[in-house]
Amino acid sequence: MSDDDVEPKPTAFSSPQFADSSYWSMLDLVIGAGAVILDSTFERVLVLYDTETERYRMPWAMHDRPTLGEFFASPFDQVAEETGLVVEKYPLPTLERYYKNPEVLDRRELQVATRLTDRYSVDPFYTSFDVFWSPIKGAETSPWLDSRQRMILWFACRVVSGSLANENVTFEPFAVAEEKLKNEDKDFPDTGALSALRQLVYMLKELSARPSA
């Protein structure tokens, strides 16, 4: 049988126009929340070793509430079960850009800079997309897996209570955590989240040390 004889088939919830694997319908989208958990020093983050996939990753939870609003209000129950830690969203200082010379007439002469504000936010600081594989609903013994487009909103978090669940859950310096999350085949979404938060922490430290604009 040649490749020409193979017609792309839609996924379980896709309409025919989404048969091409480059397109997804809204019902093919699953949403989750990721937690980059910082320790009290703001220098280390939690990393866990997933024995099923045999790789390191950051903890995350999939939407399992009646509404998205309820889920994102408190999305970390699954994280607590996995890590042994009760966590909450960490309020991060917000940044804003401003123009040093908005009065210039030539846009090429505009000078833009960044500064800290006096506002704090617990909103997600990073969003990742990847393919999420899971057992087919109602056919869990099938040798095939269902695929969805997964969107994870990543939050900075801090520990409220609890203790590390086991030896597979550790706090590591940023550089060590990034090294553990490396994968030679592909970049996983939590790798991008960790890198983004590390850059944000560095930027906040740099801006905090500068005199006010």
Image: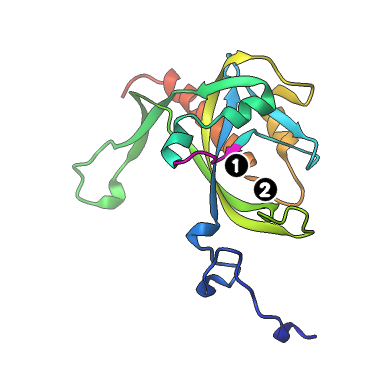
Q: Is residue 212 left or right of residue 39?
A: left
Q: Quadrant of the C terminus?
A: top left
Under circle 2, the secondary element is: loop
Q: Is residue 62 one of those drawn in magenta?
A: yes
Q: Position of residue 95 (x, y in %)?
A: 38, 31
Contact, CB < 8 Å: mark 1 with mark 2?
yes
Q: Which residues are magenta?
A: 61-67
How many callouts does the rendering have?
Answer: 2
Amino acid at dot 2: Asp
Visible residue check, residue 46:
no
Q: Quadrant of residue 73?
A: top left
* Residue 35 drawn above or below residue 149: above
Q: Is residue 133 left or right of residue 1?
A: left
Q: Position of residue 131 (x, y in %)?
A: 63, 54
Q: Position of residue 24 (x, y in %)?
A: 53, 63
What residue sits 68% from the left and 15% below the top? 163
Please name the residue that numbered disc 1 is placed on: 192
What residue sits 54% from the left and 41% below the top? 63
Q: Is residue 136 left or right of residue 70?
A: right
Visible residue check, residue 56:
yes
Amino acid at dot 1: Gly
Please name the residue that numbered disc 2 is placed on: 187
Label 2 Cα crowd, 10 Å radius (few <14 / some 14-19 / many 20+): few
Under circle 1, the secondary element is: helix
Query: Which residue of the protein is positioned furthest toward the front in this rendering?
Result: 138
